[in-house]
Image (cartoon, grey):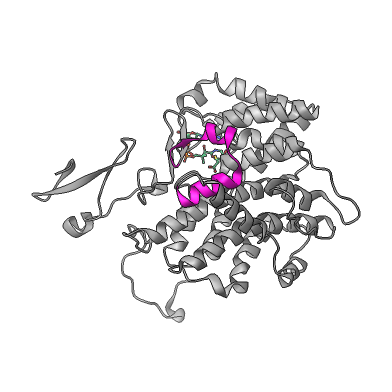
Amino acid sequence: MGESVKIRYKGKVIDLPVEEGVMGEKGIDISTLRKSTGMITIDPGFVNTGSCKSAITYVNGEEGILLYRGIPIEQLAEKSTFLETAYLLIYGNLPNKKEFDEFQNQIIHHTMIHESAKAFYDGFPPNAHPMAVCSAVVGALATFYHDSLDVRNKRHIEISIHRLIAKLPTIAAFSYKKSIGQPFIYPCNMLDYCTNFLHMMFSVPCEVYPISSVISKALDVLLILHADHEQNCSTSTVRLVGSSMCNLFASVSAGIYALWGPLHGGANQQVIEMLQTIYDGGGDVKKYINKAKDKDDPFRLMGFGHRVYKNFDPRSRIIKKICDDVLNKLGIHEPLLQIALKLEEIALKDEYFLERKLYPNVDFYSGIIYKAMNIPINMFPVLFAIGRMPGWIAQWKELQEDKEFKIGRPRQIYVGPPKTDYVPIEERDG
Ligand code: CMC
């Protein structure tokens, strides 16, 4: 008999089992609560609610630990590649050489999108946000691939995985090309994943853009750092949509939209816009720290704070280092970096931020690196989405394979009007 928690209610004692994870974290299993008491639990924002058991990613917010399938993020950032990390997340182990070659080969050979899909881009206005375009085109992939929509068919899932990882960079780069009025650049199978994306972004038919290996390597590490983060907003969205047995394209399309919000993956765009505003206004960093602390001011220090990390975000440390490295190697003096460093320095000594355990998160420095790579600001969240794709896929696949699979369907406490009779329009006031 394992550990349990007892609840006393109306003279009855209800025994609720305690589940323990491999790292010692515990959760009370309340799945029988409503049946035995008639009550549900309320937890706005799911601050205390576990939605699943997962073997993919471990986050310890107090100690600043992030593991993918048990492997520390620091080791993966140093030694792995994005595609190898994608394999690890999706299939649960590091691939051997044969497995990796096969996986990579599949990704390389699925990078093109259907020629008819290019017509979508003519329908979007040129100033469309690329997150909206990417989500729409990813969702529309389901219209082309009827051969891979059965969520209980392993082969269908497999080919959808390859298509999504391979095609998102193409879809993303096409959205940028359309917005600046340049022709689409087709993927080049001789290039590695990140170099290929940069090639599609920056080459033109009359001139191939030389891609610096410093930049493509830095991008690869950034994608690794974004690849999964357990049950965050967009991942939970992907799982919830997938729980209706909806196909992978539609589930991931919903995830891209969830990621777009400024409190989630849209924060990297907001950080640069905030730093630029501070810089343009003369660099008064203290003014913005005070604005962030003022409860009557809706302003928040973007790139600061995290629901889970209450110590530091291990990804932000690695990103800060990459940022220094990339700017040094490219010989770029970035005034926004100076503003960011000042903000961090002041915030990390300020009682308001210390008390609330608000530290720089993954988005604080990533935008400065993207800017150095000449990536336009509205594409920053798209890069987050390209990085997060393996995580969404791994989590969706784990859900579909879960023996306890159930459609997701939260409950609520109703606080609207009590039962009221319909009033005909001629009898209504006013
Ligand atoms: N600037 C100023 N105050 C903040 C900030 C911030 N960035 N973040 C949190 N706070 C305050 C908040 O006002 C509240 O204060 P009080 O207790 O006095 O009411 C307290 O800290 C707790 O905040 P919360 O909103 O209850 O915390 P949360 O866990 O619900 O929100 C968050 C987490 C990431 C949404 C929030 O910290 C935030 O809005 N940060 C800025 C946006 C951002 O950088 N998002 C990227 C997150 S990391 C990438 C990802 O995974 O998406």
Q: Residue at x 42, y 79 (%)?
A: 427
Q: Residue at x 67, y 27 (%)?
A: 340
Determine if residue 265 is in view: no
Q: Total number of numbered labels?
A: 0
Q: Position of residue 109 (x, y in %)?
A: 67, 60
Task: Give the residue at the far front of this rendering.
Answer: 98
Determine if residue 360 is in view: yes
Task: Give the residue at the far top of this rendering.
Answer: 349
Q: Is residue 22 magenta?
A: no
Q: Is residue 70 magenta?
A: yes
Q: Residue at x 52, y 46 (%)?
A: 96
Q: In the picture, residue 410 is in which quadrant? A: bottom left
335 and 178: which is toward the camera: 178
User: In the picture, which quadrant includes the N terminus?
Assistant: top left
Q: In the picture, residue 414 is in which quadrant? A: bottom left
Task: Give the residue at the far right of this rendering.
Answer: 206
Describe residue 424's horizontal placement relative to residue 225 as left or right.
left
Describe residue 88's horizontal placement relative to residue 282 as left or right.
left
Q: Examine the residues drawn in magenta and state their main secondary structure.
A: helix
Task: Give the residue at the far left of this rendering.
Answer: 11
78 and 67: which is toward the camera: 78
176 and 56: which is toward the camera: 56
Tell me: residue 43, above or below residue 364: below
Q: Position of residue 65 (x, y in %)?
A: 45, 32
273 and 421: which is toward the camera: 273
In magenta, the rendered stretch is 69-92
Q: Position of residue 16 (x, y in %)?
A: 19, 47
Q: Residue at x 43, y 67 (%)?
A: 245
